[in-house]
């Protein structure tokens, strides 16, 4: 097992696996790939030897929360089973996606001043044209590092440093569903109407969370996301709506 892998108690029925030293600043594509690899191994084990013990997994930037059934096991047993399961986890992740399949999800975006009130602000700040900002944003493949603060809110990285933009000094009280936004070197799509302090550059017509659908989200931690610019007409034909307020 990697010396950077630590398993700590995270509650009466939970453990958390850290894949780098806490506070070390090692969160990157390699660490995220190791999280993805471990999650796949544990989920596979959940179909047989851990079927009665593990209830759920919550992967994040550099960790996995493991929730277990207190009626069938305890912290000590789960920790030992996880150590055994992950003892041969690949430590050579110079090519993070080489060993484990990564889904690439394409998300359409209507980029415009109408749909992205901060698009021109970013262009002015970076001394780029609006077209260049759009091209740089859609020119990257973004890894899904974590999902939260709301269901379906996927933290994607990393934005080209030329358009990296700090969060707003005063967050908006209301951001429309589907808003595509940038904060520092991360980007995301707001899955529902909510407050938010990220810089909005467009709108995506795809539902990022649907409790009635299966799966409930189009992306998972470890996936890659590619944005594609679409016209206003295409956006509307895909079910997108305009007229939402940016308060």
Image: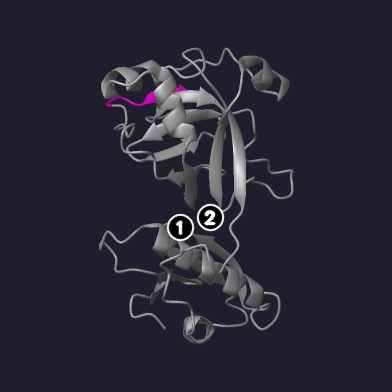
Q: In this view, does 72 lie above or below 40?
A: below
Does residue 171 show up magenta in the picture?
yes
Residue 145 circle label: none
The location of residue 51, given as percent across then percent down, is 68, 77
Which residue occupies 54% across, 49% down?
224
The location of residue 226, given as percent across then percent down, is 55, 40
Residue identifier under label 2: 221
Nearest the camera: 59 or 156?
A: 156
Question: Marks 1 and 2, how far apart in space?
Answer: 7 Å
The location of residue 35, given as percent across then percent down, is 47, 65
Residue identifier under label 1: 60
Q: In which quarter of the image is residue 47?
A: bottom right
Question: Which stretch appears magenta?
Answer: 169-175
Which residue occupies 65% across, 35% down?
207
Q: In which quarter of the image is residue 26?
A: bottom left
Is the residue marked by circle 1 packed among few (<14), some (14-19), or many (20+) residues within 10 Å? Answer: many
Circle 1: element type: loop
Is the residue marked by circle 2 packed among few (<14), some (14-19), or many (20+) residues within 10 Å? Answer: many
Question: Marks 1 and 2: CB-CB under 8 Å?
Answer: yes
Tell me: 114 left or right of 62: right
Quadrant in which the C terminus appears = top left
In this view of the protein, can residue 62 be seen by the observer? no
Tell me: 163 left or right of 135: left
């Amino acid at each position: 097992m990697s010396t950077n892998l630590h398993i700590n108690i995270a509650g009466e029925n939970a453990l958390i696996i850290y894949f780098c030293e806490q506070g070390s600043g090692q969160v990157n594509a390699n660490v995220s790939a190791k999280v993805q690899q471990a999650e796949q191994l544990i989920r596979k084990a959940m179909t047989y030897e851990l079927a009665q013990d593990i209830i759920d997994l919550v992967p994040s930037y550099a960790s996995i929360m493991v929730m277990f059934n207190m009626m069938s096991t305890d912290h000590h047993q789960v920790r030992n089973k996880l150590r055994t399961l992950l003892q041969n986890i690949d430590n050579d992740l110079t090519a993070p996606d080489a060993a484990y399949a990564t889904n690439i999800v394409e998300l359409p975006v209507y980029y415009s001043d109408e749909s992205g009130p901060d698009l021109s602000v970013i262009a002015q700040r970076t001394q780029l044209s609006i077209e260049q900002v759009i091209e740089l944003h859609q020119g990257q493949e973004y890894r899904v590092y974590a999902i939260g603060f709301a269901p379906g809110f996927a933290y994607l990285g990393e934005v080209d440093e030329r358009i990296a933009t700090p969060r707003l000094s005063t967050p908006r009280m209301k951001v429309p569903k589907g808003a595509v936004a940038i904060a520092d070197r991360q980007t995301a799509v707001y899955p529902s109407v909510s407050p938010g302090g990220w810089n909005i550059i467009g709108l995506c017509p795809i539902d990022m969370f649907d409790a009635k659908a299966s799966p409930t989200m189009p992306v998972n931690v470890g996936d890659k996301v590619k944005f594609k610019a679409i016209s206003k007409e295409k956006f509307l034909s895909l079910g997108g709506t305009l007229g939402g307020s940016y308060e």
